[in-house]
Image: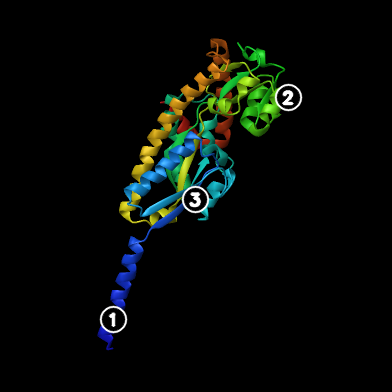
Amino acid sequence: MNSITLKKTLLACALSLATATAGAQVKWDMPTGYSAGSFQTQNVQQFADDVAKATGGKLKITLHTNGSLFKANEIKRAVQTGQTQVGEFILSGAANENPLFGIDSIPFLADSYEAARKLADASLPQIGKMLDKQGVKLLFTSPWPGQSLYANKPVEAMSDLNGTKMRAYNPATSRIAQYVGAQPTTIQLAELSQALATGTVENLLTSSASGVEYKLHEHLKYFYPVNAWLPKNAIVANKQAFDALDKPTQDAVLKAAAAAEQRGWRVSEQKDTEFVKLLAEHGMKVAPPSEALRRELKLIGAQMTREWLVNAGADGQAVIDAYRK
């Protein structure tokens, strides 16, 4: 075989290999810490299905629920390091890396879906840039229902919480308990029913979704939808893995992500309404917070925002200013 024939043969082999690689199915694993029945999980499953359909099966995303592949607090790091190609984590879980990751969990800063959407619009561009520097591409976010107040007695003002035992599960909830004169008691959701039954906890802030899932109506009789904050999940991809996709596949992923973001916000709000209705059907007294309580909670929010800004600095101030315009 002469050199020209050899070169042609090698070129043909190279082109054949490239074509085979280009046409091969790409498989991504996607860990999430939530159960298969969660509306958040159902949303990301729909995202994966939409990607498979739009790419004709060229990109297949396999969802791993309940922390079965990586624990919830390990997922962001796993995506960063390329241990998995895509994953879901709660943004505020990364607040120890940078305060901006926790902006959606500043109490009483954004206490409605409309306000939470505005805060997301103000903060996500900056958060996306931070993730990009970490080798992570932000695909979309999806909110949880607002964190609201459950109590074993009527609450008309903060003074009604003075001296009570309030469940705490992070620094923010401990700080709120201190502000209202309650005793913060660190209890995880899995231990909550027992804590309520024994009187270790008398009130708490959590979502309507948790209220239904953990049957809080069996122990607590009052629910006030104060929507202290609406935390968001982020669905992110390893940037190197995303960049390795061809352009049509990238476009399909981004299109499916945009649809999932809109669906996530819409379904979360719908589910919140359904969950609150279920709490009432189970005998829980559902009532809007009094004007006095709302005013006092807003004052707590303003103070905690100032405390957050001390750590977040100029970048945090810029996001808050944009949100408040």
Of residues 215 and 264, the one drawn nearer to the viewer in this rendering: 215
Label 1's element?
A: helix
Q: Which residue is mark 3?
A: 134
Question: In terms of image quadrants, where is residue 98?
Answer: top right
Q: Which residue is mark 1?
A: 7
Label 2, secondary structure: give it: loop
| Image: 18 above or below 221 | below
Task: Decide which of 212, 120 is in the foreground and name it.
Answer: 212
Q: Tell me the amino acid under the disc marked 1.
A: Lys
- Which structural element holds mark 3? loop
CA separation, marks 3 and 2?
41 Å
Residue at image coords 36%, 53%: 57
**Residue 152 in the image: above or below residue 55:** above
Q: Measure the C-alpha gap from mark 1 to mark 2.
A: 79 Å
- Residue 120 x, y percent position in the rendering: 44, 33
Q: Give the residue number, with chain letter if any, for mark 2.
A: 200
Q: Earlier in the sequence, mark 3 or mark 1?
A: 1
Front-lying residue, 107 or 288? 288
Cα distance between the residues tagged 3 and 1: 42 Å
* Total tally of numbered discs in the picture: 3
Numbered circle sitting on residue 44: none
Q: The residue under label 3 is which amino acid type?
A: Gln
Across and down, in percent, residue 257 comes to 38, 42
Type of amino acid at the residue the image marks with label 2: Thr
Residue at the extreme bottom of the image, as rendered? 2
Residue 184 coordinates in the image, percent (x, y) = 69, 26
The mark that comes first in sequence, 1 or 2, is: 1
Work out whether 264 lies above or below 201.
below
